[in-house]
Image: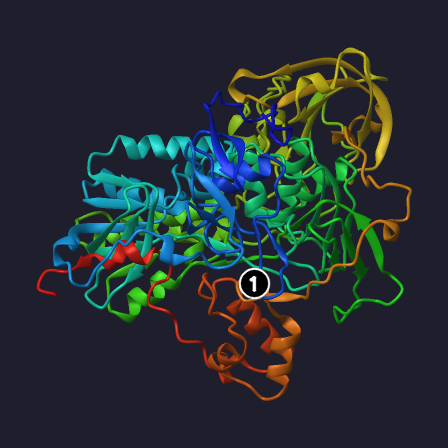
Amino acid sequence: MPHNRINSHPILEIPESKTIKFLWQQKPLQAREGETIASALIANGIDIFGHHPKDEAPLGIFCANGQCSQCMVLVDGKPVKSCMTKVKPGMSVMPADGLPDISTLPAVYSTSSASQEKLTEIINKSVLIIGGGPAGLSAAIELGKLGVDVLLVDDKSHLGGKLVLQTHRFFGSTKAVYAGTRGVDIAKLLSQQIDELDSVEVWLETTAVAIFEEKTVGLWRVEKDEYILVKPDVLLVATGARERSLPFKGNTLPGIFGAGAFQTLVNRDLVKPTNNLFIIGGGNVGLIAGYHALQAGINVVGLVEAMPQCGGYKVHEDKLARFGVPILTSHTILEAKGKDRVKSVKIAELDQNFQPLKGTEQEISCDCVLIAVGLNPVDEFFQKAKEVNMAVFAAGDAEEIAEASAAMFAGKIKGLEIAKHLGLEIPEIPEQWREFENILKSRPGEVLPLNEDAHPGDVFPVMHCRQEIPCDPCASVCPNNLIRIDLDNIRGLPEFCSLDGKKCIACERCVAICPGLAITLVDFREDPQHPIVSIPLEFPQNYLKIGDQVPVTDVDGNILAKVPVTYMRTLRQFSHTLIVRVQAPADVATKIAGIRLFFGWNQSEETIDQYHQQTQQENIVCRCEHVSADTIRDLVRSGVRDINQIKAVTKATMGACGGKTCISLIKKIFREEDVSLDEVTDPTQRPVFVEIPLDTLANQHQEGQQ
């Protein structure tokens, strides 16, 4: 198989899968059975999937979630999204350079041949749930337990949504939302519970297309190429979120991904799309994706965040800092350089008005840029359902952007609310549940000082977490209940305390379960001058061996000393978290937070400008029609206040994606130009939210129609 495959991973098992052959531009390539065209092409070292008809700019993937159409290719002459279409043996794939010649395609519909028409099936269901992520699954489980007739649909081939991309342990409550368990494992747990419920039916690879005034939902079962209408008593929209784009010069070059696309390639499909990654955005999504990159053997050359502080959990930021990843706050990207794919990025420091400071520009070599600048809810189905007066609920990111743990709990509540709406006699939902949901959705608190010089005994855990976030696995796992978190405030920092004469038994469970890898264990019992420090590490054991001298760092990534490795082990119930014991000087033992395996900024000493070509691309807002931010800004400054007028002049929002990626950016430009959105007219929304082949619909009719 090609070299762009990940053949070993510290968390994920490498599956044995059948190899199939397909054609790319008439040349044979290999793919893994069941993977998408996009993943197969990138695994084969192919980044350019086509060229834009307007400016001939090279195009690759961006979202890998079916939300944009940048990855379109032609399969046997028909345009498809390569990120959503599976490879099939013998399939012929070509770049989508220009429109296909439809005269060469077989006729599928004739207005004079009524015998070809199919009667569109209409199915009645008590509840239809769109989205099989954490919120949709949790709601379906609650409804299924009550025997409610549920149809759950998802456009992917596996349930779990973004959970299947998350290899880290989750925060939140151990009892309520599986805190301390990895996201990929939570997806399996929830899927298993769904399988055990007789009243819940699941349709995978099924795309919700539109909502109609008859209070029906159009579903396209992709593999069967079958179009069905569902008329539910209640609709639950749990469609998650789509990633925001960011206008900067060269922002559509191949190799520039949304964070979800990067995680899809690396954690779902085990494809390595890059060697040197640069990240834009210091929220949880960007910080976590950076750590996932390190686990996949990818060098993270830097991260920029426009705000003075990263917005994600401090423990996620600390994990990157311990590996020497440069994190530059109050910085932004100015340009991505490269001709056929990204080769470098140009960044600059920002002033207090978020304007680039002249003279602070620097260029960094990289072959991939990950954009993680926030999410927008996929809520068009919810809004349309309200418009046609359907009984509709929303849960998870479709309702409010938050962590997956909050989405699970919100889905549980929504499931019970739907049950009450249907008239089932169930107890009232406790008010404490809603309060707890808000806690799970809460933003991280201020970064607090740590007292790492504390010495509470001969052997004890050191808590390096220094920010209030909802998290309790360490308290739940201690066999002697010596780690305490305020029962009334799961956001509180954990404390180690003695209880009825009980002492720490050095079981290392708290070290292994901590989602932030923010707990170490210090043992002074054998040698008070050179205690043993147990450190969590989520990397393969073959990176280290007993006797190695390793650099250990404090919580901020500063190297404290080089110390010998004395022992390594993995606890059976906490698989894939390696506990590394080192022997350290007493004066630094309690300050040790991690081991550095990689070393920061990996640049050639050669001057970058000598070999990185300036890009010819603009700062694109509309990816489908390649409309730049400058063009939109000029129209706004000329007095345009109707996005329909912008559409008429530029074709922005008229592309295949239907404005999913550009409307929010256009509105952002209005705000930047001090135009209130109250003055702005939204564009007319197309009735079909997701692309569907016309030949799938052409032969359909409803009963009573001709």
Residue drawn at x 40%, y 42% as measured from the top left? 156
Determine whether, in the image, residue 392 is placed left or right of residue 365: left
Kind of residue indicated by mark 1: Pro
Residue drawn at x 43%, y 48% as measured from the top left? 407
Query: Which of these two is toward me, 74 or 248?
Result: 74
Residue 553 sits in which quadrant? top right
Residue drawn at x 72%, y 20% as measured from the top left? 543
Mark 1 burial class by Cα count in 10 Å: few <14, some 14-19, many 20+: some
Relative image position of residue 466 (x, y in whole percent): 68, 43
Relative image position of residue 673 (x, y in whole percent): 64, 80
Relative image position of residue 475 (x, y in whole percent): 55, 31
Query: Which of these two is toward me, 602 or 488?
Result: 602
Residue 380 sits in which quadrant? bottom left
Instruction: State which quarter of the image contains the N terminus.
Output: top right
Most extreme residue toward the bottom, as rendered? Answer: 639
Query: Which of these two is toward me, 540 or 171?
Result: 540
Query: Which of these two is toward me, 604 or 595?
Result: 604
Label 1: which secondary element: loop
Report whether residue 170 is seen: no
Determine whether, in the image, residue 658 is placed left or right of residue 354: left
Residue drawn at x 62%, y 42% as measured from the top left? 289
Above or below residue 600? Residue 254 is below
Relative image position of residue 123 (x, y in whole percent): 16, 51
Residue linked to disc 1? 53
Instruction: State which quarter of the image contains the C terminus.
Output: bottom left
Determine whether, in the image, residue 354 is placed left or right of residue 287: right
